Image (cartoon, rainbow, N blue to C red):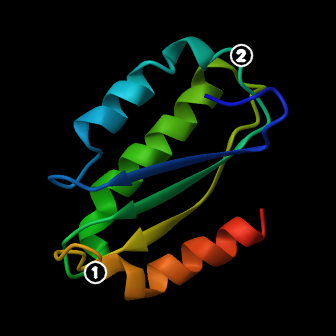
Amino acid sequence: MTSPGADVIVLASPMYYFTWTGLMKRFLDRTYPLLKTLHDKDFYLITLGGVPDKKLMANILSDFNNYVACFSEFNPHANMRNAGAIIGTSALAPGAIRASAAMQEAYEAGKNL
């Protein structure tokens, strides 16, 4: 998942039916053995969906919050942080996200890491 020196973990997934894709869920499930070993990381979420409003992204944001919180539940000294989310909406047509504010926000966030 990360190298020992990585400070940041970025999870990126489109939103299907208001949550992760099946592939992302499978990946997250396979990180279970890391719950007691990873520490001092910032987690970011990049997601997009065809919904017109960010409030409809509440479920995937909740899932992301719960995933990051699992590390502290299993290891109180893990010091894992939810560093934020970049959310794209109205991404119905192929390539529609390219001109969105979320694309620029992700680019700028990447430059600042």
Q: Nearer the viewer, residue 77 or 20?
A: 20
Mark 1 neighbour density, 10 Å: few (under 14) some (14–19) many (20 or more):
few
Q: At 41% from the left edge and 28% from the top edge, which residue is drawn?
A: 27
The residue under the point 14% across, 53% down is 17
Quadrant (top left, top right, bottom left, bottom right) of the C terminus: bottom right
Q: Which residue corresponds to mark 2? A: 37
Residue shown at 61% from the left, 74% from the top: 107
Task: Specify the amino acid type for callout 2.
Answer: Thr
Q: Quadrant of the N terminus?
A: top right
Using the image, determine if residue 10 lies above or below residue 78. Answer: below
Quadrant housing residue 110: bottom right
Instruction: Determine whether 3 is above or below 18 in the image.
Output: above
Label 1: state its secondary structure: helix
Comparing 2 with 34, the one in front is 2
Query: Does the residue at mark 1 contact the one at mark 2 (Cβ under 8 Å)?
Result: no
- Dot 1 amino acid type: Ala
User: Residue 96 got which mark?
Assistant: 1
Left or right of 55 in this view: 47: right
| Residue 93 pos. (x, y %) | 17, 77
Q: Position of residue 102 (x, y in %)?
A: 46, 78
Q: Residue at x 46, y 87 (%)?
A: 101
Q: Reading the chain from its start, which is encountered first: label 1 or label 2?
A: 2
Q: Count the marks: how many?
A: 2
Quarter location, residue 99: bottom left
How busy is the neighbourhood of tag 2: few (under 14 within 10 Å), some, or many (20 plus)? Answer: few
In the picture, the disc for residue 46 is none
Closer to the eye: label 1 or 2: 1
